[in-house]
Image (cartoon, grey):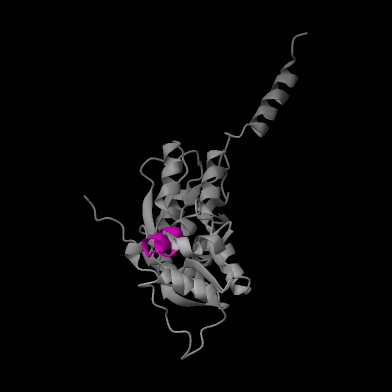
């Protein structure tokens, strides 16, 4: 029996609905952003200002950069990806999933050791990270847990492990590490008092009044903490490039710096 014209039209429409690669952008579609969890406060502020200025909307999914990269690889419909390290952006790039020439280095951050409770003036001075950090941390933990993001996948966890290894403390504390799915999860464990110590980004510590900083890890104790951003290759939303450009604007810089990030200036023309 030959298919009728009507049945062919119905079949074609069905294929358009189920086909994951048909991502036709429509006027007014929100820009879908996949962003590292540590960006939440700053990026919420920045995109709210962009929406107020332009009337355009943004939908943001926050998680560990590793989880986001794997979701993009699996075909999740994102327009922009903001990673907390170069490695997971490289992962997406190697899969051929980035728009050529759209990748930029946007922000820098630092790594800190935190404890529960607000900072009390005159107490809890910054602890010394040398010469024997392992013994110091073991005493401070007193059998408790050291909260970190997943050490073999999430950027904050990888940076933290690298710093502890460089400072000779990893072997002393590795058995007491409580791993969270992302850095905000590690932050929450400390803020709730479920872990006496944690390793997070300085911006995370600044965003939560339920913790205070005990020490800042030296920049040379871990790989540089750089946040790259890029447009996903199959994005059809023209506002993705507009938003990415806005993230380098003076207004966005102010929002990022209020949260403790360092904004990386765009390379000069011709460089």
Q: Position of residue 77 (x, y in %)?
A: 57, 43
Residue that appears at 34% across and 65% down: 219
Residue that appears at 35% across and 72% down: 131
Q: Position of residue 148 (x, y in %)?
A: 53, 62
Residue 120 appears in the picture as rendered = yes
Location of residue 184 (image quadrant): bottom right
Query: Magenta: predominant secondary structure element?
Result: helix
Residue 47 appears in the picture as rendered = no
Q: Position of residue 231 (x, y in %)?
A: 45, 46
Q: What's the magenta region? A: 161-169
Q: Position of residue 153 (x, y in %)?
A: 50, 51
Q: Does 253 sit left or right of 173 as displayed?
A: left
Tell which of 58 and 191 is nearer to you: 191
Residue 168 on the magenta span: yes
Residue 208, placed above or below residue 124: above
Residue that appears at 37% across and 60% down: 222
């Amino acid at each position: 029996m030959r298919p009728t014209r009507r049945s062919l039209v119905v079949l074609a429409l069905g294929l358009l609905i189920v086909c994951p690669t048909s991502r036709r952008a429509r006027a007014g579609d929100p820009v879908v952003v996949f962003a590292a969890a540590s960006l939440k406060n700053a990026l919420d502020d920045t995109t709210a200002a962009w929406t107020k200025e332009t009337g355009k909307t943004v939908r943001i999914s926050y998680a560990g950069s590793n989880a986001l990269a794997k979701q993009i690889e699996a075909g999740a419909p994102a327009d922009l990806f903001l990673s907390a390290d170069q490695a997971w952006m490289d992962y997406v790039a190697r899969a051929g999933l980035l728009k050529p020439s759209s990748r930029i280095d946007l922000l820098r951050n630092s790594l800190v050791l935190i404890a529960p409770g607000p900072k009390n003036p005159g107490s809890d001075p910054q602890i010394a990270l040398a010469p024997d950090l392992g013994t110091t941390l073991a005493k401070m933990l007193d059998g408790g847990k050291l909260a970190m993001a997943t050490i073999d996948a999430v950027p904050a966890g990888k940076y933290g492990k690298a710093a502890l290894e460089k400072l000779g403390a990893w072997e002393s504390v590795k058995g007491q590490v409580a791993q969270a799915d992302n850095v905000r999860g590690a932050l929450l464990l400390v803020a709730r008092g479920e872990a006496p110590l944690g390793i997070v980004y300085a911006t995370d510590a600044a965003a939560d009044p339920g913790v205070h900083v005990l020490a800042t890890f030296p920049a040379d104790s871990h790989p540089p903490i750089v946040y790259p951003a890029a447009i996903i290759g199959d994005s059809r939303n023209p506002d993705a490039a507009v938003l990415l450009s806005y993230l380098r604007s003076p207004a966005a810089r102010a929002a990022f710096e209020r949260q403790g990030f360092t904004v990386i200036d765009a390379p000069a023309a011709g460089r």
